[in-house]
Amino acid sequence: MPNYFLSANTSSEQSLAIERSIRTAIPDLIKIANLEEIAKDIANHPNAPTYILVAGPADNAAYIDRFVDIATQQLGRFFFILISADISTGNYKRLIRTGNADWVSVAGAPQEIAEIFAKRRSNSALAEKASVEPEKPTTIAFLPAAGGVGNTTMVTEIGTWLKTQKANKDRRICVVDLDFQTSHICDYLDVEPRLQIQEVSENPDRLDAQLFDIFVTHHSSGLDVIAAPRSKFDIASLNMGALDNLFEIIAKRYDLILIDLPVTWFAWTVDIISNSNAVVVTGINTIPCLRQLAQTLAVVRDARPGLPQDKVAVVVNRCDRTLLGGVERRQHVQSVLGDEQVFYVGNDSAALVESANTGTPLALSGGSRKTIKEISTIAEYCLGANAPNVKAA
């Protein structure tokens, strides 16, 4: 796998320091002065993925425009990784949306580049597998450990982030909200819920493909939402045949299904978990909620005794940050959850409140670059849930 290093608009001292740092992880790095040099070498590696690591400024608008243009033009030939001190949320999203570029920080370059390589290898393996095997939908159950931990927000953000990525343009993604009494996912997206769950429950056989189309809400991002208007419908009386029919149709329509489960467990909750490729349990970093997380994880594993360790993950939401950008009280999470696979999402409260009030997810309106990157990491985990071994990025 050829890896090239190109320095653009950086001092020779900065360039040398970045190159030395990268070589600790990529000793066979090939230094080039311009893109034209690659043409002379690419003939020796006709089938290998080609990565171009570029040390350049992220605060230069003209340079970013040019970088995005080149990455877009070279889609399928090279993959570009911009290395810089920092980058705005808007510019980071522009890079990602090309489907052919990413960004890493100068400080974390070796580790972050290795993570990008691993993620792309995993995606390539999944694509190859899909080409020889019939496509099956990937289903992720999002389960809140307690009320008010942001489970619905997380599902919404992940779904919309995935649909805004160029690589997922043709991927059929939906969110299914199973909180029929207090559903609010459509409020976050400023759309109308259409699923008439009571009507379906009373007459499950009536639900067919044509009626299902009426019950689907289409968001401008491309994400489909299956949610019911808030009502005091008696969920305990929900006809299990109705849910079976509903999910049978959903499974034929979508490649990725994100399920937003309510806090309260019902007779069908275990069935949903049992038929999901992975389970994500959501909580916050307080001692009471960490204990609830641990208890919920135990119940999940009791319901799915054969579920591999890497098919269960935890999202610790609304984390406070230290001065250096780390997670405050991280040791509390580790002491309670032990070796569980944990994703941390920072407390971007101002952006989230504005996002909720305007009905525009952060993936579309823009939150902090770090928060969006944390959400994207969970989203990539969801995409890989059908793989034999899912690892946290």
Image (tube, rainbow, N blue to C red):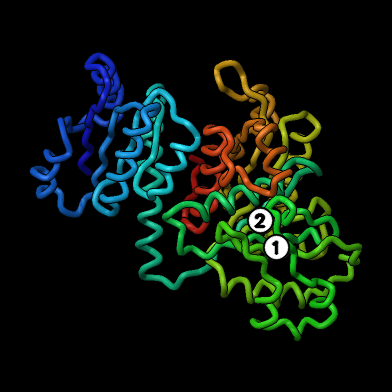
Up/down of 233 relative to 73, above or below: below
Asked whether the beta carbons under mark 2 and mark 1 sit within 8 Å of each other, the answer is: yes
Element at label 2: strand
Badge 2: residue crowd in 10 Å (few <14, some 14–19, many ≥20): many
Q: Position of residue 325 (x, y in %)?
A: 56, 22
Distance of mark 2 from mark 1, alpha carbons?
A: 7 Å
Task: Find disc 2 in the rendering and name its residue.
Answer: 141
Q: Determine whether, in the image, residue 142 is placed left or right of residue 16.
A: right
Q: Is residue 63 visible?
A: yes
Which residue reaches farthest left? 40
Q: Which residue is mark 1?
A: 272
Residue at left offset 31%, top offset 45%: 69
- The amino acid type of the residue labelled 2 equals Ala
Q: Position of residue 87 (x, y in %)?
A: 44, 29
Q: Residue at x 79, y 56 (%)?
A: 183
Q: Is residue 109 visible?
A: no
Q: Position of residue 360 (x, y in %)?
A: 64, 48
Q: Residue at x 13, y 47 (%)?
A: 42
- Residue nearer the viewer, 386 or 85: 85
Where the N terminus falls, by quadrant?
top left
Q: Residue 108: where, in percent of width, then height?
A: 41, 25
Q: Residue at x 56, y 68 (%)?
A: 254
Q: Secondary structure at mark 1?
A: helix
Q: Is residue 353 left or right of residue 161?
A: right
Image-based side of 277 in relation to 50, left or right: right
